[in-house]
Amino acid sequence: MKKKTPNPHQAIGIDIVEIKRLEKTSKRWGKAFLNKVYTARELRYAYSKRYPHQHLAARFAAKEAIFKALGEVEREFVGWKNIEILNDAYGKPEVHWHGQAERVRIKRKLKGAVVSLSHTENYAVANAMLVPTRQK
């Protein structure tokens, strides 16, 4: 029986973030750190919540999970803010691709990525799955 070659465009990634560590980093480096990693919309969303660092950590973990799924070669070129994690009208997280990330998505023939986020008082976790476009 011939082995089926896996789709090179399909991949998953996972990441976990310690919320207090992210909070310390954001306090130490302030807006310079926050504006390097998050879009204005991500920051608005997180700071509209009672515990914003939980939401920031979850988005950080989601971006890392996407980078892991893309692989190291692509990671250097994508950029933090070119992957944006927002919520749809029902609260489900969605990945928005911008700039170099969008170019990588098209080059890799990806429809997009699906992410799942979760957080507790101490940790935020996210997983991401790259979704290839349908090919015949």
Image (cartoon, rainbow, N blue to C red):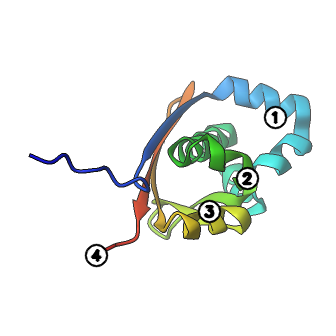
Image quadrant of residue 78? Answer: bottom right
Image quadrant of residue 122? Answer: top right
Instruction: Determine the secondary structure under disc 3.
Output: helix
- Between circles 4 and 3, the one closer to the viewer is 4
Left or right relative to 75: residue 8:
left
Q: Earlier in the sequence, mark 1 or mark 2?
A: 1
Q: Earlier in the sequence, mark 1 or mark 4?
A: 1
- The foreground one among 37 and 41 is 37
Instruction: Determine the secondary structure under disc 2.
Output: helix
User: Residue 114, percent across and down?
Assistant: 44, 57
User: Residue 46, percent across and down?
Assistant: 68, 50
CA gap, disc 4 and disc 3: 21 Å
CA gap, disc 2 and disc 3: 9 Å
Q: Which residue is mark 3?
A: 104
Contact (Cβ within 8 Å) of mark 1 with mark 2: no
Mark 4 crowdedness (10 Å alpha carbons): few <14, some 14-19, many ≥20: few
Work out which residue is located at the far bottom of the displayed protein and give it: 136
CA gap, disc 3 and disc 1: 28 Å
Q: Which residue is mark 2?
A: 77
Residue drawn at x 79%, y 25% as measured from the top left: 24
Instruction: Determine the secondary structure under disc 4.
Output: loop
